[in-house]
Amino acid sequence: MVIAVVLYGTQICVPQPALGQTPQVMRADTTYGCLMCHAEKRRSFSTGIHSDRGIQCDDCHGGNPEAFEVPAAHQGRFLGDPTKLETVQLCSSCHSDADQMRQFGLPTGQLAEFRTSRHGQLLLEESSIDAPTCTDCHDAHTILPPEDARSNVYPTNIPGTCARCHQDGDLMARYGMATDQFAEYRHSAHGVGLFDRLNFAAPTCMGCHGSHAALPPGVTEVVNVCDRCHALVGRAYAQGPHGVPSSEDGLPGCLACHSNHGTERVAPDGISAQCTNCHEPDSPAALVGIELQEGVVQASQDLDAAEHAIDELLLAGVQVVEARFRYQSALTSYSQMALVQHSLDLETLDDLAREVRSNSELVRARAEVRAEARWEHKLFLVPVWFLALATVALAWFKMRDIGHW
Amino acid sequence: MIKKTLRVVVERVVQLWDDLTESTDAGLLGVARFFGLIYGPIDRSLPIDEAFKKALRYRLAAHVGWRQMFGGITYLLFMVLVVTGVLLAFYYRPSVEEAYPSIQHIVSEVSFGWLIRDTHVWAANLLVIAVLAHMARVFFEAAYKPPRETNWLIGLLLLFVVLAFGSTGYLLPWDQWAYWTVTEVLDAISAVPLLGAMLADALAGDVIVSGATLSRFFSLHVIVLPWIAFALLIYHFTLVRRRGIAPPASSEVEDSPNWRLSTAWTAEEHVEEGGTPFFPNHMLRLLMVTVLVLAVLTTLAALFPRPVGDLADPYTIPDELVSTWVPVDVSLALVRFLGAWGFTLFTLFALVLALLPLFDRRLERRPRQRPVATTLGLAFLVAFALAWFVGRRLRSVPPTTRPQPEIIGQLPTLDPPFLGLAEGRSNELAPSGVDAFKTREP
């Protein structure tokens, strides 16, 4: 016990870094001149990744950090508050240098990409101050890696980061752009996936527009953009009558039915209405749409019926392992229909719809057998009550006979 | 040849019948005795034959009639529960893995399994009503007064046994309704000061309702409680026989205290001359009631089977709990509309009423001359019926929302490479288009 106390005592006498704090590379406040005046920058910079890597104020801003007087500190190669253009040059001086970035496994193409983006064109060619520079998205001092949840470029933060400018009505009006992208995205399948289900495989703004090379995809590129995630749908679409015209002749592609930022899922009963966006209501193409819709709606109803039948079976205490297996088979066929409908291949759709139907019917048949059994249980009551009432009647007559009532 | 064989067979049958009729007195008893089924060649020293005849000849007082049938119905339902319970136990398996599938097997695959199971459920419900009706008859006619006060106490113990039977049986289907109802009941028990937590722990055998609880409830339901019930029933019936059935309500002392002298087997009964014989008069009455009760039971079982809920899942609180037993209905309504205190007060009221006979020892037995007892009894019955009706209408309620453990903060942090660097957000982890359809939107 005594030894333990002594050991414990010697331990607490030795100064130890507090748990959870990474040692700061930045030199102590008193010796690092910049912080004597710019104390408020200390905290924001020290939480960023540059601070962890040993980068100091003067590495970007120049000047003399050893000096204690302002004129001495701000002399020499001193940058002060860099302009947007200077910022791009400053960041790329390291981030475009493959020799420096190799050790961190970071790519070096940001500047090249930025040049191709609309943002880059505005800033680098037109010198517009409307255009964002590196620090507008990544912050000037608190620069965090994208996997840090506090970062502006963390997946769930990206839409908000973009919306900071793209929801600004005055700013967007100058370029003739709408400001409802974020609102539409928030309720789209992608937005719901990202924000509500925290599914980080769902694309943010960057998923379709790129990050440093941010540009709206061209009309003929849309299919390819969607195809990067929805590969099977893309393949089916390419095989159908819309495929070639979309990629070559500039038809709107996926957006024609699903819109862009809103990415709406088309309900089974809303399929044919989409066709008439482009085709005449009575045209052969619109009729194909109606036929397609009927098949999908019917399959959807078959699935619903099978689901309902399984619920009934469960309530009646029937084991539903096989019924569930059938339902899964039907669901698989239905999922394939969702793919195949993009190729407008009615024959294959018909085959799949038949598979949905036959599997659903098997489930429903089981439920019907059960319902019949229930009916038989009720029929069973007829002889029961006949015998019961007959017995009571006989007993009653006998009781009357013996005069005991 | 055929003729000859036939003649031999006929001769043999005639010979057998002659033997039967000559060796014993004719009739069903004679046949049974011939085969040694009842007293006969087995042991001639025991007067079983005599005892049986005596029991049939036994005469009940003239005032005994339809009003006394509730006790009989209670016993009948109890025996129905015993028989159907044994049949259910042939297929039921008391383990977490097998309980639910075995119930499914019983109701959907075993022939007439549905009838046995639902008869068991409905008999358990009707039993509570029959017990209450029986107690009400005894209470309002003051049949609990001396010399029958002991039997009232035995009856009370039997009531608790009935409630314990229902409570332990409630868990056995091992579906969500059973699981979460029992969880709530155990929570309620553990909230009772002093002994509550200990009792709930002992009953559950685990920190949550689990396989340990299922084993305990099963063994209580099919081993412990039946023995207790049979012992109490024998005592109950013996006392009924010795003290006789209470005479009509009056303020007088019973003029013929035959309970002091009569014993079951040896002494002569005192009502030989008066009253009506048990056989056939009361036997016919019993037959009618039995047949009608069984028919009603079968009807309820066929028309209103107890549904099978989802498999019990300790990690998911169901949207609703469907009540399947009268006391649960009553408790539901009480807790919902009067709160926990209302439920406690009602239970205390019932207890006071049950123990009233211990203090009410006047000889007066006419309901009108006992206004306090009669009013209290009526009030209880009306409240019970009302609560039952309301609870039946509620039928299903969401379970109590209890504080959920904070799991959001404990979610493992996502692996950074999964997110990809800003540059590297390629389609490597992107979902295929089918994923969107795999989970159908509600």
Image: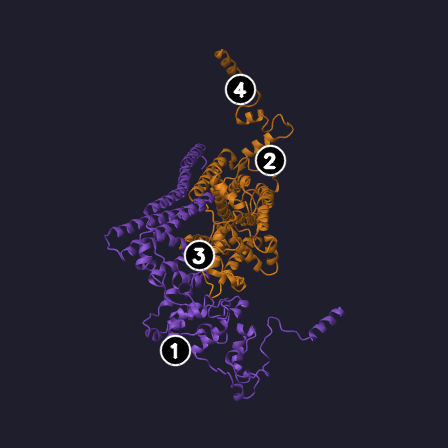
Residue A173 location, quadrant: bottom left
Considering the numbered disc 1 on the image, is that residue within a helix, a strand or a loop? Answer: loop
The crowding category of the residue bearing disc 4, from other C-alpha atoms within 10 Å (few below 14, some 14 to 19, many at least 20), is some
Q: CA distance from mark 4 to mark 1?
A: 122 Å
Residue at the (39%, 49%) spot, across then down:
A336
Which image quadrant: the C terminus of chain A? top left
Mark 4 lies on a secondary structure that is helix
Q: Are marks 2 and 1 in contact (CB under 8 Å)?
A: no
Q: Residue at x 47, y 60 (%)?
A: B338
Q: List the residue tagged with mark 3.
A: B431
| Quarter of the figure that contains the N terminus of chain A | bottom right
Q: Are marks 3 and 1 in contact (CB under 8 Å)?
A: no
Is there any visible trace of residue B112 in the rendered image? yes
Looking at the rendered structure, the kind of residue marked 3 is Pro
Amino acid identity at mark 4 = Trp
Type of amino acid under label 2: Glu
To the question of a shared chain for discs 2 and 4, the answer is yes
| Marks 2, 1: nearer the viewer | 1
Q: Is residue B145 visible to the viewer in this orientation of the structure? A: no
User: Nearest the camera: A258 or A313?
Assistant: A258
Label 2 Cα neighbours within 10 Å, binned few <14 / some 14-19 / many ≥20: few
Chain bearing tag 4 is: B
Residue B44, position as x, y percentages in the image: 64, 27
Work out whether disc 2 and disc 3 sit on a shared chain.
yes
Say which residue label 1 marks.
Answer: A129
Q: Nearer the viewer, mark 2 or mark 3?
A: 3
Mark 4 highlights which residue? B17
The residue beneath circle 2 is B268
The chain ID associated with circle 1 is: A
Colour chosen for chain B: orange
Judge the density around disc 1: few (<14), some (14-19), many (≥20) Cα neighbours within 10 Å.
Answer: few
Question: x, y percentage for residue A146?
Answer: 49, 67
